[in-house]
Amino acid sequence: MRLRCALLGLVLGTPSVASTDAGTPQAPLELRRSMPFVQVLVNGKGPFTFGIDTGTSSDALVAPALAESLGLEAAGTVQAGDPSGKNPRQLPLVRIARLSVAGVDFQRLTAGVYTPSQAEGRCDGILGFALFRDWLLTLDSPGSRLTLEKGKLAPSTDGSVVPFRAPDGVPVVDLHVGGETIPAVVDSRGQGLAIPAARAEQLRRVGDPVVIGRGRTISGEFEVRGAQLADDVELGGFRIHQPFVAFHPSFPIGNLGAAVLRQLVVTFDQRSMLLRLQAPERTLVLPRPQPRGPPAAPDAGPPPR
């Protein structure tokens, strides 16, 4: 389980976009521990491996080694922290003239410099949710493909298209468990399914919570407990059958991570504030997580607009 952190500070411009391909822009996705990675060019150089993080509200983050090797221009600092509000940190900012994904050029970006976890292998940076604000972003994990399209989604009657909100620049949906509604970030670099520990007693469980490991955010480490739910988790027209969920001890919001998203084709429309879910089956089953060491450290998002 990886939990999002948000940045509080200054915004240095909005990127412009230029398509370099006449067809529908697409790129292969590589899944590592269910999390999506894609190859990108930075200032015409590369390719470099970037994770795709819908739980980070910045345009991009770069690893210190990449910023140094490309000689990226410094652009000040920004304060970063997670939703717990504890132990914020200052991160340096750099300017990127051009970042290319799937044949699309995103120009004049400001990126935070932050070291992603190496638990999933080499990662040169992160592409955040805000980068794709002007596109329909489709993460097709079953088909190992990223697609960028113009246009917009339309509401549906079958539950495949659901509204989201983005109070901190990342997509938040409502999960329904029994009679409870739990908001959760749709987080492609979150590992599993998590809910706030404060809501645990409101849910029917199969057995008591057990320790499953330790989590880590930019603000520090914490013990993670989890339990199997006795009810299904519902989102739109989809059900997650009695999943094993993690309980976060201090965050006020849940996390819908890669273990769920890898079973779906997910399209985000930031302009219409809608997302579309597609899968052959409407009932999803999650494997019980195995105890392991600290998960991927979260990445930082930009200041609220």
Image (spheres, rainbow, N blue to C red):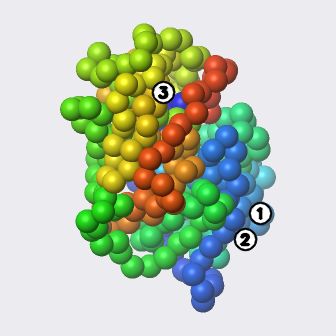
Determine whether 281 is above or below 135 in the image.
above
- Of residues 299 and 251, the one nearer the viewer is 251
Element assignment for label 3: strand
Q: Along the line of sight, which residue is nearer the eye, 78 or 174?
A: 174
The quadrant of the image that shows the N terminus is top right
**Observer able to see residue 18:** yes
User: Mark 3, mark 1: which one is toward the viewer?
Assistant: 3
Residue type for callout 3: Phe
Q: Pinpoint residue 188: horizontal percent, then vertical percent.
A: 53, 47
N-terminal label among 3 and 1: 1
Disc 1/disc 2 C-alpha distance (Å): 9 Å
- Is 144 situated above or below 106? above
The residue where tag 1 is placed is: 47
Q: Amino acid at mark 2?
A: Gly
User: What numbered label is drawn on residue 304?
Assistant: none
Residue at 43% x, 53% y is 282
Residue at point 66% right, 61% down?
Answer: 144
Residue 78 vertical placement versus 249 (above, below): below
> In this orientation, which residue lies closer to the viewer: 12 or 258?
258
Relative image position of residue 130 (x, y in whole percent): 44, 58
Residue placed furthest toward the bottom? 22
Residue 170 location (% of width, % of height): 39, 49
Q: Residues within 10 Å of mark 1 (few under 14, many from 20)?
A: some
Q: Return the residue at label 3.
A: 244
Residue where numbered disc 2 is placed: 44
